[in-house]
Image (cartoon, rainbow, N blue to C red):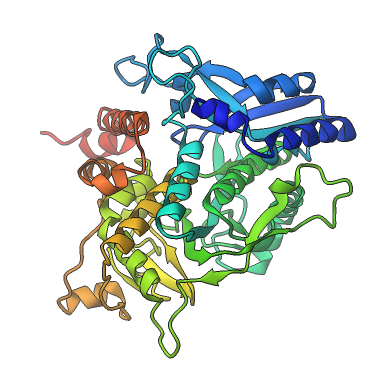
Amino acid sequence: MTDLERHVNQDGRAELVKQVRAKIDELGIRYIYYQFVSVTGRIMGKGVPSDHWETLAERGFQLVYGSTANLFTDMNGNYIGFGAEAAELVGIPDAETFMQLPWDKRVARVFCTLFRNREEDDDPGGRLTADCRGNLRAIHEEFMQKHDGLHMRVGTEPEMMWLKKGEDGKPAGGVTKPFCYHIEQFAELRPVFMKAIEYSQAMGLDMIQGDHEDAPGQLELNCTYDDPVRNSDRLTTYRQICAQVAREENLIACFMPKPFMGVSASGCHHNMSLWREGTEKIVNTAHANPLPGLEGSYTYLSGGENVFMPLPGEKKPGPIGLNCVGGVIEHLQALTAIGSPTVNSYRRLWDKGFWAPVYADWGYQNRTCSLRISAPGRFEYRSVDSSVNPYLMGAALLKAFDDGISRNLDPGEPEHRNIYKAMEAGKQIKKLPMTLGDALDALEKDEVIRSAMPGKMLDVFLHYKRDEWARFNATVTEWDVETYLDVLP
């Protein structure tokens, strides 16, 4: 069988397809978004009346390959990744992700896995390597097979800003003042965050905590950690929820990393650990009867053995945890291209004094380092911002973990000092790339992180991002005019 046929005929899927039909009938669903995620993190797909669920579940939908790159053209007018002559991909819905939209209960959404067209001459029905979500699932499965069932659990901290909308539709400043952790500023955004939390809980996000951060209108609302694919799905869902709340409140939900200089940017720190075993646990069902989606949307991994935990009597992470820290430190230069994937991302790194780490080191609760042990049993990767594609980031971090474990990499001693004070005292530390162009150069040189984007994925990503960097360098900005208009005589 082809990869597509194996996916459609996997054990238990036929029953899940029937359960979705029952949910459609029970909830009165009339329309379904069949969605996937492009290399830049945009949500793509098609909408189809729910009458056709069974046909789509078996045959899928077709869409041009270039949709994995947002169907954008580069500055020379060429389609990125795939030309008009390319075939159409096949998107197969993953029934376990079926979910009613709480803001329009006539509509549901389902995430999809992408495959090559059935009529392709080369590898018909094969896994589409430009599918970042399917790619993450495959890399996680390979990691578990190689490392005796060890699996990653990850939680992300999605900072973003709520901006006022001017009469011209453009941003008119933040809704609140840039006061970090102030409950009064948090309360100013209560209509926004309560609606976002309500929608999130309805869609299976186990919301745990939130606060006002230190930029105008900046919120962070977190949910429970889980395996990397479901965590990425939930971050993607959260972004869709914020976009909907913004429409309802006539605001702008801004995931641009650095819209304002002189205040903190929006990060998306990744907290990670590796586990053996564990059980599936259903959460967030008390508020919903009937459940507005399949149970898989409400399932989290719980329990088991966390192999990052320190050994008895020690403070450092366990040996596997240290190897993983070593792997991430080893590949931080290339990882930066994925965690800081836009030109604007590097404004965050240049605006010193606002918590964004620019040096490749690690420590305990030391926010001047790119990695910190945020609690026993997990570490936080900090060099990642709000524009990240979490599917690409998860795959790249798994490759860094694998390299650290396979090569028994030692990260050295943790840094307890402020990293800048340590450097003044003579410590030699690698600096992260400080432009998108430099980060892409580092990625191209790193075989381990390149392998996180196999096949066509790397070509699509590099084409898209090299073009973004070229467009920036070919653009005259307001800064150019202000600086050089009267440069001579």
In this rendering, the answer to whether 297 lies above or below 110 is: below
Would residue 480 be seen by someone viewing this image from the given angle? yes
Question: 192 or 460, which is in the foreground?
Answer: 460
Q: Residue at x 43, y 90 (%)?
A: 313
User: Which quarter of the image is occupied by the C terminus?
Assistant: top left
| Left or right: 281 in relation to 442 | right
Q: Position of residue 180 (x, y in %)?
A: 55, 66
| Left or right: 436 in relation to 141 | left
Q: Position of residue 427 (x, y in %)?
A: 17, 74
Q: Position of residue 233 (x, y in %)?
A: 59, 44
- The residue lying furthest to the bottom in this view is 313
Q: How many marks?
A: 0
In this rendering, the answer to whether 225 lies above or below 339 is: below
Would residue 260 be seen by someone viewing this image from the given angle? no
| Left or right: 358 in relation to 209 | left
In this rendering, the answer to whether 206 lies above or below 371 is: above
- The image quarter in which residue 177 lies: bottom right
Q: Position of residue 301 (x, y in %)?
A: 63, 59
Q: Residue at x 63, y 43 (%)?
A: 237
- The image quarter in which residue 358 lies: bottom left
- The image quarter in which residue 159 lies: bottom right
Question: 362 or 434, which is in the foreground?
Answer: 362
| Left or right: 403 in relation to 252 | left
Question: 217 or 339, which is in the foreground?
Answer: 339
- The residue lying furthest to the front in this view is 1
- The residue lying furthest to the top in this view is 85
Q: Residue at x 23, y 47 (%)?
A: 446
